[in-house]
């Protein structure tokens, strides 16, 4: 898939605003969208911009089966809409690997989706993990490891 031109433009704009741009790589960091469907991807991107969504929680098994690197504190990523258009740059502030059944009301609240309750989080994410893990050889389990990534929005698309 071709990178949307807005990703490079956003990264170049971000670098131009930095006092020491040479401390950052020239190439844009990894860009991705939330969720597995267009409506939710767009909604989650807007929730990040508003400051409501400050975390995400894919399964550890997704990372293991896809070969993707786990997020780390300090990582920068570009959040896109479903179509790959850059929405904002986020910085990872904390990463925890927790069993699904140990996600708390606090976690559900900072993930910022739905009605913010733990019950809503569990139902929607349980369904999501079934889809996310399809074809990987993994099946969602109550104690499956979840990568709970907290982040802050540091550069919205309209920052320049």
Image (tube, rainbow, N blue to C red):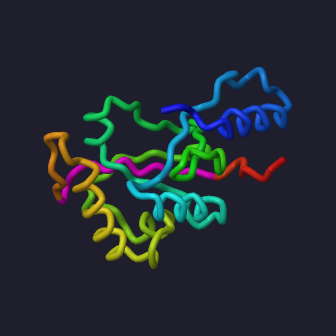
- Residue displayed at 40% across by 47% down: 96
Question: Of residues 71 and 137, which is closer to you in this image?
Answer: 137
- Residue displayed at 45% across by 45% down: 95
- Residue displayed at 23% across by 47% down: 133
Asked if residue 156 is positioned above or below residue 19 in the image, the reply reads below
Task: Left or right? Give the position of 18 relative to 33.
Answer: right
- Residue displayed at 18% across by 42% down: 135
Q: Position of residue 23 (x, y in %)?
A: 73, 23
112 inside magenta stretch: no
Q: How many numbered dots are placed on residues in this image?
A: 0
Asked if residue 95 is positioned above or below residue 66 in the image, the reply reads below
Question: Of residues 125 and 36, which is closer to you in this image?
Answer: 36
147 inside magenta stretch: yes
Q: Position of residue 114 (x, y in %)?
A: 45, 74
Q: Position of residue 52 (x, y in %)?
A: 59, 67
Q: Position of residue 129 (x, y in %)?
A: 27, 55
**Range of the magenta residues?**
142-152
Question: Of residues 152 and 44, which is closer to you in this image?
Answer: 44
Task: Left or right? Give the position of 16 relative to 106.
Answer: right
Majority SS type along the magenta span: strand
């Amino acid at each position: 898939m071709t990178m949307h031109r807005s990703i490079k433009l956003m990264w170049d704009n971000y670098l131009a605003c930095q006092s020491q741009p040479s401390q950052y790589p020239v190439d844009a960091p990894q860009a991705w969208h939330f969720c597995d469907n267009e409506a939710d991807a767009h909604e989650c991107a807007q929730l990040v911009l508003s400051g409501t969504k400050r975390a995400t929680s894919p399964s550890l098994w997704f990372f293991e089966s896809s070969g993707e690197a786990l997020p780390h504190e300090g990582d920068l990523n570009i959040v896109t809409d479903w179509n790959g258009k850059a929405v904002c740059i986020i910085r990872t502030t904390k990463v925890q690997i927790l069993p699904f059944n140990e996600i708390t009301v606090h976690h559900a609240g900072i993930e910022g989706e739905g009605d913010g309750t733990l019950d809503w989080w569990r139902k929607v994410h349980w369904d999501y993990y079934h889809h996310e893990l399809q074809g990987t050889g993994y099946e969602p389990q109550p104690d499956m490891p979840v990568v709970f990534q907290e982040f802050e929005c540091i550069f919205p698309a309209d920052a320049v």
